[in-house]
Structures are given as structure tokens and as C-alpha cells.
Amino acid sequence: MSENKSLTLINGLRPFKSKWRLQVKVIRSWKQTPPYADETLEFVLADQTGVKIHATCPRAHMFRTQRNLPLGEWRVIENFKISGVGKGKYRPTSHQYKMTITSETVFTGSDHQDDNPFLTLANYENILNGKENSNVLIDILGHPYDVGAVQIVQVNHEDRKRIQFRMRDISGNNLACCLWGSYAEQIENSVQELDPSNTVWLLRFAKIGEFLGEIQITNAFDASLLDLNPTMAEAVDFKRRIEENSIALPITDKKHDKREIIPHADDWDDVGISMISEISEISELDQTKIVCSVKAIDTDWAWYYFGCTRCKHGVTRLSGKGSKSDKPLFRCPGKCRANVSNVEPRFKLHLIVEDDTGTCKLLLLNSVAKSIVGSEAVDLWDGSYEEIEDPEILPQPIRDLVGKSFCFGITTSSDGADIFKVTQVWSGDIIEKIESQSEPLTQIEGGSSCLSSGGVLLIKENTEPSSDCSTPLSKRKENDADLPDLTSTSKKICLNQIKLEKTKTD
């Protein structure tokens, strides 16, 4: 073999011959067993310009090829077949051709050195806008949040592990993600050691799909590669920019403020205000604001759920009667994945609100609800672990919300199609600003507010001057999206039982 034979770049490959000489680096390799076909060895190869191509090796040449093409190493390959990739979905690269290893293929070493991982990071906005080619696997880098527990589901009569979460980029764009099998196990085994608020994940060769009308990123069988806290330059730079810019990262509500919490930094100034009649007609709501007053507490729902004191995940009671001295056992499906007895109540308030155009239902989770109630859920709890017998018996600070006016930043909720989740709250000052720039809203009762040096908004109701309520302004999202629907909670014993009027539908 001549040592001075010229090398061809990947973009120069054509199917008309097989006597090519190519210098490449192995980016990814995996075994694949398609239905009703023999097992093959698949590769993604890159040349020194970063262009990538998919290569496949039939079972007859698998052992020799696997030995000669180690992951991450540069090699010179000669004599291989080039063919079209076809029109199938989920191609590993965007190249119009693919390589096939044959019995005549020769592998030799290379002196070329380059540790570049040759990422081709997909743009979140392009994915969301449908501009990214969904037929080609992508590389996606982001900050994970709302990481749920690993679930076991049946697929084609087989049990498979699945984990769902979301990832966001530096601008706050976010995507739903779902990983299966070994990828779910990888996260399950590592999540105990990782701090979700300071983590970057890289998913290579992932596919763009759709689930329940939403774009979703998932693994492409065994072709994908998951790297938790990667060390390449792109990931290090991404992590640095997160820390410098304090983008909208999920936080965990620490009861005793043992560490500093970075406020949620969504730019709500760019979000418009909608009327309730408008949002009720939207099936998939992104973000908007509504200015409204609280008409009633929706007592079809309990006002709190039990969460694990360690990981804050919603828990499910197992069995047995509990008391203050004898705590019952709960199952924590979060990070703990164990039976626990140390649980505490966390807010899950459902409000019925109204403006001039109509009414709607809102869901407020722990820290957001705390910002308008003015108390921790555990402070309003009577200590009982038993189910609520009368959900209309509510703690006084929650009953006091009725008649108060707020500006809520809302989005869609998983609790129901007609329920919107509150992720941000403003009160009197923004209401006054809105009214000064438009026609007064007749439903807005609250007249004034002031901001104290401690960051507390005092909301004053003109109709009840004696019922002033100190309300911390919420500036962060609550990381309670993965809590289960719980109907078993406990009731708060009140001296004066006041039943609120419930809305009824015919």
C-alpha cells in the first residue's frame, strides 16, 4: 500500500467507487439488532473538518472492525462502500451518504491528534419552531429541571424504565425530554450525587418526537449518548453563563434557608396581560398575566399535600393510622426511593378567580402560595395525618385570600385542562400601574401597596382595612411539577367554621 496516497474528506465521498482513503475519528459506536435482520455494528465517524457520516458493519466483520475502530481514536480507513441513506427517520447524521464496511476494508493507525468532540448542538428555538430536521438525530445541551422519578411502564408487553424531565438553554427556552431503559437507569444511579441546580446534561444523537401534542426529545434506541456534567469546552462555557446570568433555573425550597436561593429570572416585563375570557379559549397556553380577584377557594381539592422533608417530592401514604407521636409510613418516589416517615405539608392551593370577563381556576404550589398566604403550610397544619373530612374547613389565612386582588403570571397546569398554574405573583403596585394606563377594572378591589426594606408587599383591601396581610413577593417557580395527585391529607381544626360558597355547574 502506498504511503503517499491522498486522503479524501467525508464531503468528497461518492458512491461511484469504493477505493476511498479516509482519515476519521470514532465519535460514537453501538450495536443494533433491527427486527427480522442480523445484528450490525454502527458508527458515527468525523473527519478533521468536523463533518460526520454514518457507517455500518455487518455481523461477519463486526469483531475485526470493533477491534480496529476504538471510540475516540483517529484511524485511516480504506476500501469501503458508499451508498445513499434513504428516506428513513432518525438518521445519525445529516450526510446524504453512509459507509458500509466490507471484507476488503483496511484499517491503519493515524498520527493526527484532535480531542474535539465535534458537537453539532441543536438550537432550542429551531426545535420548537419546527425548523430543525426531525429526521436527523441531534446533540442537545442544557440545564435539567423537573426531573421526575424513574417509572416502570409496559411497552409491547415488556416492562421498561422511563424518566421524564425538561431541559432549558441559556435563554430560558425549554424542551420536554423522556429517556428509556439504560439512560433512565444512568440518571437514577447518578442523581443522588448531582446537584440539579448546578448541573449541565448533554444528550448526543437524540431524536425529536412528539408526545401529547408537545415536542419531546428522547433517546434513539441505543444510538444516543448521555453525558451528565460533561467537561468539554461547550459545556463548561454553558455552565459559566448560567452562573453569571442567573437564568431561570429551578430551585428547591429549603425550609431553613441553609443556602442562598437564586430568584427565578423570567423576563415577565415582556409578557402581556390577558383577560380571563381569552385564556379560557386557549388549549395550550405558554405564559401570560391576568389581573383578577379571588372569588373563592376551590375546596374540591385539598389545600396541601404531603412532601418528603429530605427531597421535597410528593409522597403517598402506605398504611396505618398516624398521630403526632406515631407517624405513618409514606412512599417517596423521588430521590429517596424509600419508605419515609419524615414528611410535612406543602401548599397546593386551588383558587377560583374572576375579572370583568369571567372566571377561571388557578393552582398555586408551595413557595408561590406561601407568598400570598404569608405563612408556611406546616404552620397552618393541625398535625394530623388523616384524610380531610370536610375540605371547606380552611385555615384563616387561606380564607382571607377571598376578595384580594393580584396580578398572576400563569401557564398551563397538569392538574387539568381548565386549571392554570401560577408561577409568579404581583399585587397592588402593578395593579395601580395597569389601571393608570387603561380603563379601570371594576373587579379590582385592592387599592394600595408599599414595598418595605425587607422586600414585603403590604396588600390593603379598601373594603376591609383591618385585614392587612403581609405578602412576600414570589420571584421563583416552584419545583413541584412532579407531585402526584393526592386526595389523602389532613384537616385543619378551626374554632370558627366558616363555609365558603362553592361554584356549581349544572
Image: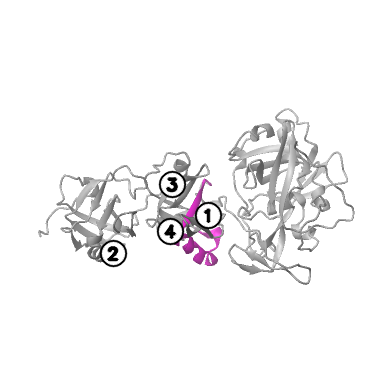
| Residue 195 among magenta residues | yes
Which residue is label 1 attached to? Answer: 164
Name the disc covering residue 208, or none. 3
Foreground tag (4 vs 1): 1
Query: Residue flagged by tag 4: what amino acid is it?
Result: Leu
Disc with the residue nearer the chain's start (2 vs 4): 2
Whichever of callouts 3 and 2 sits on the residue coming sooner in the sequence is 2
Estimate the x, y position of residue 176 in percent, counting from the top left: 51, 49
Foreground label between 2 and 1? 1
Residue type at the position of mark 2: Pro
Q: Nearer the viewer, mark 3 or mark 4?
A: 3
- State the residue position of label 2: 70
Contact between labelled residues 4 and 2, with CB atoms less than 8 Å apart: no
What span is in magenta? 172-199
Q: Residue furthest left?
A: 2
Q: Residue at x 78, y 40 (%)?
A: 503
Left or right relative to 110: residue 358: right
